[in-house]
Image (spheres, rainbow, N blue to C red):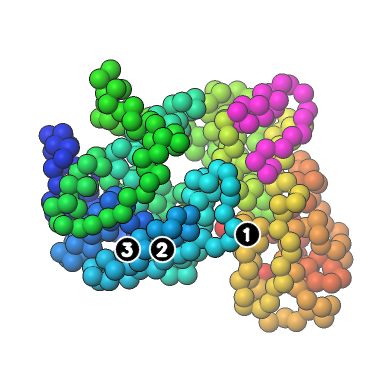
């Protein structure tokens, strides 16, 4: 984790940050060609915005910087706060856009729903503007709160690793960068005050209705008992080191044991799976369900443990987890995308246009051949008509495992399934790749 220049400077909790400190904090960002910075109008994100703009202006970085602000529409002041951000961005020479959360707002679980909407809006804007990564102003206090919150939930190594400086697959698949995780909030505030920069205060940040606020107010008492912010950050680093080692073990098991079919399903020897240590089995199972399904998030630990227990009971079994079917039969564990209400509908396929389906695959027709039997469709094999020629499934794979395989067809016949079937006149005309 990139930190401040030395431990002594970290201890000066109320000292402002200077250019040298920001140069070191931002050093891992230099290879980025473009960055979106999330700016709410609060002290943390405004300090990050100003520091990034000044870092760019000093010639330390030559990429594109773009400000993104989400107006959730939950407070009367939100529109004015977004306009304040837009004004400061103009003064800094940073292009900015305010993204509005439209539609009816939830009556319960508001913060979680707002967070989901925020990342969705970020993703859509970043795709439209071709921005490669999102920089966020999470700081040392946020990291401590995250750790304590997950500790109260009984999290394991992954949860207690808390927030990572570089998160390659964050919410909505966004690549997230957090350069301020080692910095106390008080130093960000001191930096803004020294520059005479104003910011907005969100009343929810002081409301004890929210757990994160209650945890924050416990910080002084915990520090008196020895659990200071620095001790928490040290534990987080230890957890992240253990997390990396465990993931490398899972990488090795996956490379050696897991067979992935082009059409989507994957399998491994059940004996090899059952012989793994519990933690490695759970991590492998989580990773494989994410790969086989279109879901971005791992299943919850209790769901994983329940599924693993049933799989290892010793009898043939078929169950669902995280949008997947898990099937133990003939000494193999096979995993494939579940067919259900969440499965995407077929999409119309036109020459030279790439389409993405089910959050799993993209397809492009590479030739100009015309279908004499109506439109071309890209979707699940289960929705396609029968092939003209027999389609032979590979040995030792369940037929059911290919129901949600990606397929191309016209009104009368199946034309292509990667690794399984291609109609003679259509061979080589479709490129289907995993997203």
The reply, left or right, for residue 100 in relation to residue 136 is: right
Closer to us: 272 or 385: 385
Residue 315 sits inside the magenta stretch: yes
| Picture disc at residue 150 | none
- The quarter of the image holding the C terminus is bottom right
Residue labelled with disc 3:
85
Q: Say whether disc 3 or disc 2 marks the residue closer to the N-terminus.
A: 2
Residue labelled with disc 2:
79
Q: Quadrant of residue 47?
A: bottom left
Instruction: Determine the secondary structure under disc 2.
Output: helix
In x, y percent, where is residue 270? 67, 29
The reply, left or right, for residue 61 in relation to residue 399 is: left
Q: Are marks 1 and 2 in contact (CB under 8 Å)?
A: no
In x, y percent, where is residue 99? 45, 64
Residue 21 in sight in this render: no
The reply, left or right, for residue 86 in relation to residue 317 is: left
- Residue at 71% across, 25% down: 310
Q: Residues within 10 Å of mark 3 (few under 14, many from 20)?
A: many
Instruction: Determine the secondary structure under disc 3.
Output: helix
Closer to us: 27 or 55: 55
Closer to us: 321 or 204: 204
- Residue at 80% across, 46% down: 399
Query: Quick check: 414 above or below 44?
Result: below
In x, y percent, where is residue 177? 35, 51
């Amino acid at each position: 984790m990139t930190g401040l220049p030395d431990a002594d400077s970290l201890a000066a909790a109320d000292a402002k940050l200077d250019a040298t400190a920001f140069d070191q904090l931002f050093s891992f960002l230099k290879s980025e060609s473009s960055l979106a910075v999330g700016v709410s109008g609060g002290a943390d994100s405004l300090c990050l915005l100003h520091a990034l703009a000044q870092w760019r202006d000093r010639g330390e970085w030559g990429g594109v910087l773009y400000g993104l602000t989400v107006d959730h529409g939950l407070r009367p002041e939100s529109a004015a706060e977004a306009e304040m951000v837009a004004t400061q961005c103009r003064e800094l020479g940073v292009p900015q856009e305010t993204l509005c959360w439209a539609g009816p707002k939830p009556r319960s679980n508001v913060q979680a729903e707002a967070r989901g909407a925020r990342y969705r809006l970020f993703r859509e804007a970043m795709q439209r503007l071709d921005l490669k990564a999102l920089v966020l102003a999470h700081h040392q206090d946020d990291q401590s709160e995250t750790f304590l919150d997950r500790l109260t939930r009984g999290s394991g190594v992954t949860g207690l690793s808390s927030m990572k400086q570089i998160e390659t697959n964050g919410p909505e698949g966004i690549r997230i960068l957090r350069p301020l995780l080692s910095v106390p909030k008080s130093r960000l505030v001191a930096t803004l005050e020294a520059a005479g920069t104003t910011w907005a205060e969100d009343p929810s940040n002081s409301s004890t209705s929210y757990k994160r606020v209650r945890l924050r107010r416990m910080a002084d008492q915990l520090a008196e008992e020895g659990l200071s912010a620095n001790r928490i950050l040290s534990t987080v680093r230890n957890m992240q080191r253990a997390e990396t080692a465990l993931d490398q073990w899972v990488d090795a098991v996956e490379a050696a044991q897991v067979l992935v079919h082009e059409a989507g399903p994957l399998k491994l020897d059940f004996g090899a799976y059952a012989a793994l240590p519990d933690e490695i089995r759970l991590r492998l199972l989580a990773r494989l369900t994410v790969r086989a399904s279109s879901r971005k998030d791992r299943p919850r630990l209790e769901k994983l443990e329940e599924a693993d227990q049933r799989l290892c009971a010793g009898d043939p079994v078929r169950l669902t987890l995280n949008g997947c079917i898990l099937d133990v039969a003939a000494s193999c564990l096979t995993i494939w995308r579940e067919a259900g209400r969440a499965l995407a509908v077929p999409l119309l396929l036109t020459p030279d246009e790439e389409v993405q389906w089910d959050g799993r695959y993209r397809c492009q027709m590479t030739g100009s051949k015309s279908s004499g039997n109506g439109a071309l469709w890209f979707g699940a094999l289960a929705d396609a008509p029968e092939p003209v020629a027999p389609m032979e499934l590979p040995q030792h794979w369940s037929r059911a495992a290919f129901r949600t395989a990606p397929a191309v067809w016209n009104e009368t016949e199946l034309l292509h399934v990667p690794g399984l079937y291609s109609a003679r006149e259509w061979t080589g005309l479709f490129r289907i790749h995993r997203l």
